[in-house]
Amino acid sequence: MSECLFCGVKGQAERLCGCDVCTMCSSGAYSAGLQRWGLELSEERWEETTSGDNPQTRHVLRVTVKYPSTLRLEAHFTREGPLNRVRKFFGHKEMPAGDPLFDRFVWVDAEFQEDLAELLTTEAFQSAVMELVSSGGVRLGEGWVRITRGRVDGDLQAFEVATPAILLAVQLEQRGRQRA
């Protein structure tokens, strides 16, 4: 029997992004967990039309999770790729986690921050970031986690992309509370 990291309910939990999460929270029933951690979840939606001979409409969803602690980190996580190799060639440095698998998969665009360096060594933080960069990127800002996703073939549902971002925000809030 384990405790859901998000809502705190004890019982059957599954491993999601390196965290124990109950079925209710993993399926998008967030209200108890949001209240428990003092998180605010917001979403913005819009459509973009591509140009060219065959224009398509792209549905875009931005999910922002705000956390209340004073922990303030700034970083942008994306998947490692050719553009990042060019950036490295021209001297742009990334912040390594020290885990070879994570460092090969994720580009961490951030100045050194002690709290971020410590979080990057944890399985749960790495798992949530890897989940988020596998379908796009994730940004950390002044008290928030933000993801933006677009899809041409239909509308996105917030719970499809929000759970890893929420779990990341919970870890940041936990860290902030430990530091206070």
Image: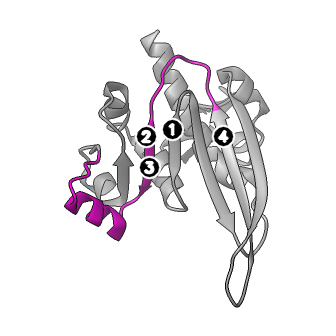
In three-dimensional space, the C-alpha distance between marks 4 and 2, rounded to whole angstroms, equals 14 Å
Residue under circle 4? Answer: 64
On the picture, is 140 further left or further right than 95? right
The secondary element bearing badge 1 is classed as: strand
Whether the magenta-drawn stretch holds residue 92 is answered as yes
Kind of residue at disc 3: Phe
In three-dimensional space, the C-alpha distance between marks 3 and 2, rounded to whole angstroms, equals 7 Å
Residue under circle 3? Answer: 77
Residue 103 or 36: which is nearer the viewer?
103
Q: Position of residue 164 (x, y in %)?
A: 58, 46
Q: Position of residue 12 (x, y in %)?
A: 64, 39
Residue under circle 1? Answer: 140
The secondary element bearing badge 3 is classed as: strand
Q: Is residue 12 visible?
A: no
Residue at the spot x=43%, y=13% of the render? 179
In three-dimensional space, the C-alpha distance between marks 3 and 4, rounded to whole angstroms, equals 15 Å
Q: Which residues are magenta?
A: 66-94
Compare marks 3 and 4 and give the one earlier in the sequence.
4
Kind of residue at disc 2: Ala
In three-dimensional space, the C-alpha distance between marks 2 and 1, rounded to whole angstroms, equals 5 Å
Residue under circle 2? Answer: 75
